Amino acid sequence: MVVNEKKQKEIKRYTNKRGQQPPDIPPKTNTLPKIFLQSVKTHGERVAMRKKRFGIWQEYTWNEVYRHVHDFCLGLVSLGLQRGEKVAIVGENDPEFYWSELAVFSAGGTTTAVFTDANLQELGYVTTNSDSMFLIAHDQEQCDKALDLLEDPTFGPGFKQIRKVIYWEERGLWNYEGDWLISYSEVEALGREYAKSHPNLFEEMIAQGDEKDIALFSYTSGTTSLPKAAMISHRNLIYANSNIEGVTPRRPSDNYVSFSPLAWITEQSLGLTSHLIYGFQVNFPESPETVQTDIREIAPSTLLFPSRLWEGIARTMQMRINDSIWINKVLFSMFMPIAYQIIDLEDEHKPVPLHLRFLRWIGEFAVFQPLRDKIGMVRMRDAITSGAALSPDVLRFFRAVGVELKSLYGSTEMQGVTMHYQNEVKLASVGEVLPGIEIKIMDDQEIRVKSNAVFAGYYKDDEKTGESFDDDGFFMTGDAGYIDEDGHLIYLDRVKDMIGLANGESFSPQYIEGRLKFSRFIQDVMAVGGFDMEFVTAIIIIDFENVSRWAEKNRVHFTTYVDLTQKPEVYEIIRKEIDRVNDTLPEHARIRKFVILHKAFDADEAELTRTRKLRRRALEQRYGEMLDAMYGDKDAVTVSAEVKYRDGRSGVIETSVKVATVNV
Amino acid sequence: MAKLHVKNISLSFGGIKALQNVDFSVEEGQIFAVIGPNGAGKTSLINSINGFYRPQEGSIILEGKDISNSPPFQRAKLGISRTFQNIALYTNMTALDNLMAARHLHMKSNMLTGALFWGPARNEEIAHRHRVEEIIDFLEMERIRTEVVGNLSYGLRKRVELGRALALEPSLLLLDEPMAGMNVEEKEDMARFILDIHERQGMTIMLIEHDIGLVMDICDQIVALDFGVKIAEGTPEEISHDDAVIKAYLGQEQ
């Protein structure tokens, strides 16, 4: 963190401007398992979670969940799990995932959730770095990784200390040999046996829990270095919820769809922890591919997605409207401008004229309600976006069609910091400071945060932990932003990612990228600039599905993805999108040149983090030739990029990428 | 006793001899492959086994019982189920309905009780739907469950067809080029499904396939045909070194 070396001066401190205070947590319910026991008592035979299996939503009551957690916990204990030990879990969101976590918490252990698409190195690094003693692995795919890791020269020795690998999806694993692998139900059976000789052990272990115990390790996405394990205590998780409670209250009657990966802290906090505290129903989709239909069937009242997913949904919706019959298109183009007009007036705190309200009301029946029904958002009360900053255009789009989308700003280390209040949404901001949180803004616009939800430090890395806190005990986020006159936080960018240009001006690439990504033709984009560069350029990744559909309609012939990207017609539609965005930007921040990349950015090639944020340094190096071409007046550049396939093989593709100029 | 014994069959269409004196047996629980160049008679062989063609000579013996004179639907009842090279599904029905249609063989309710859809007929439908859902889960078809088959991609249609063959609950599964026209990923998926079916249900599987690498990987026993004549039979290892097979595939040096 270069920014910490120079001493910054504090400008001002802020707390919740409405003076709300989060409730304190009583010692009786100061860990997740204690809350769990209480909720089982209160809710008993009510449905706690549902999972779609064999085409039907299978229900689990709180009492059933208790049995599963109880048995699995004692099963782990009988296999040697001790207080303070670590357990890694890798898999899709499933009831078993929630149960496993609760079981480990109950025994006083710590969990680490890993992204399912983690490759061997990533899984090996996380399991060994966290000193995990068990690995709970969803299915054959993950178990195969575990077996491969045993043979791995780097991670093998550390990985061998894992006592058992436990899987809950048995498909394909029927004939695997050895007792290192064991199924979830076998562990539960062991637990039932163990309970006979150790009655009440489960409750006793839970009673020993303390709020300062570390519940989970959440690996920071590591845009700059190897991922670090942020230690999150029970207290952190519970306070993060009570901080948000004043802004968006949850009810036991709520329905929630658990789909965001559990390796992401927000799902742990506002999914799992909220479920325990408020007792709402959690629904698990049938498979990752069926999420859209499953959400429609559930019509949840709460949804929590990273901004990428919201952008994807917005793009799909626009595409669907385009493919719809003419009457739908006409209605949409009639009422959408009205809806936008109302949103903009509300955003500027201006009164909305009565006739607009009336037209919007008709539009609600004609288009918006049916449209929301198509995506399962008719009952939506809390639609929340988090992770990378969501483009204001996308936020505006959702609010216009009637989805009350709100931004939540936070990070792994501090969880939620600011959020939009109902009816107080400013499109450009990420909301107001939450109750229970104190933030200060430094003279270089860095945001620093203090609250009970701020993490306990990095695992086995006291040095980094020390560097992350300033003398007043504030966590140094490295994010740049400011509080505007309405008390809203405007998020700009990472402090180190605010990019200066050769002419002394600076710009926020994330902002430009967010605006561009609202185009249905653009899937990804990186805006580039720097102290040695005179102007801003961009590398564009097209949305293959939408562009190829467009090409078909407009009789543009192409063979492959690579071929499509280099069509002059495609360059022309992208140029139009850039013109539209350039109009909203100050002169110096406008994009002058761009290229359409011959391939998509890929997390497997370390071009994106697993939460799909751009790794700018890596990308700038990798596509250095293109940057040189754009700043060096070349028309095209021949590139040969090495491609790593998921199975470890690699190949080379060679192609010519054109450089296009935009008139500003 | 062999699961299936194809005993000296010969099949001709007018002057064309599609199969000549072909003889081999498939053991219980094997994955058995039939290979050969185009026009070697592979599909004719499968059609003869499931009863679409009647060989003029020889007999088909299933578990010791001569079924040479049984029509296709009776052979299906005896546990022979198949997929087609060119996919034969109800294209205007959903994937789910295609699978349910295959359960017809196991349904007891008649037109009247089915129309009233009450009591036993309803329970029966639920039981069969459950069985079909297990197959959908097994073949990872959740996403396409309610999609009309005609709108699906080629690879997915092949998968639906495999699902339909499984819905018959066969003891002998005949697959006619299950991986033709697929990309590498789809092929690997299909190979995994075939292995899973074999491993999970111990089903005897006989398949025609052109991708020799894949055949070598997953099969226990192979028979090679050329111009309707069996030219070799053996394990993948033996077949890959067989001179007659190499000649049939690569031609002979002049």
Image: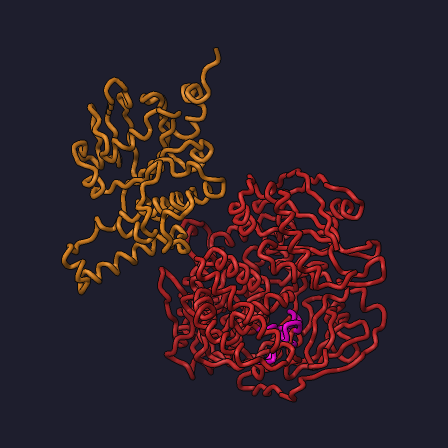
Chain colours: A red, B orange
Relative to residue A18, is residue A273 depicted above or below? above
Q: Position of residue A372 (x, y in %)?
A: 46, 68
The residue nearer to you, when weighing A466 against B101, is B101
Residue A197 in view here: no
Q: Which residue lies at the image location 52% right of the left edge and 78% below the top edge?
A: A355
Q: Position of residue A255 (x, y in %)?
A: 45, 74
The residue nearer to you, when weighing B223 against B186, is B186
Residue A391 in view here: yes
**Would residue A9 appear left or right of B49 to someone viewing this image?**
right
Q: Position of residue B36 (x, y in %)?
A: 38, 26
Q: Quadrant of the N terminus of chain A?
A: bottom right
The residue nearer to you, when weighing A594 against B122, is A594
Q: Which residue lies at the image location 47% right of the left edge and 33% below the top edge?
A: B213
Relative to residue B18, is residue A578 depicted above or below? below
Instruction: Report which quarter residue B224 is drawn in.
Output: top left
**Would residue B90 appear left or right of A664 to someone viewing this image?**
left
Q: Position of residue A222 (x, y in %)?
A: 68, 60
Q: Which residue lies at the image location 32% right of the left edge and 49% below the top edge?
A: B92
Q: Quadrant of the C terminus of chain A?
A: bottom right
Q: Which residue lies at the image location 27% right of the left edge and 19% below the top edge?
A: B16
Q: Which contiguous range is marked in magenta?
A: A406-429
Would residue A209 be counted in the magenta stretch?
A: no
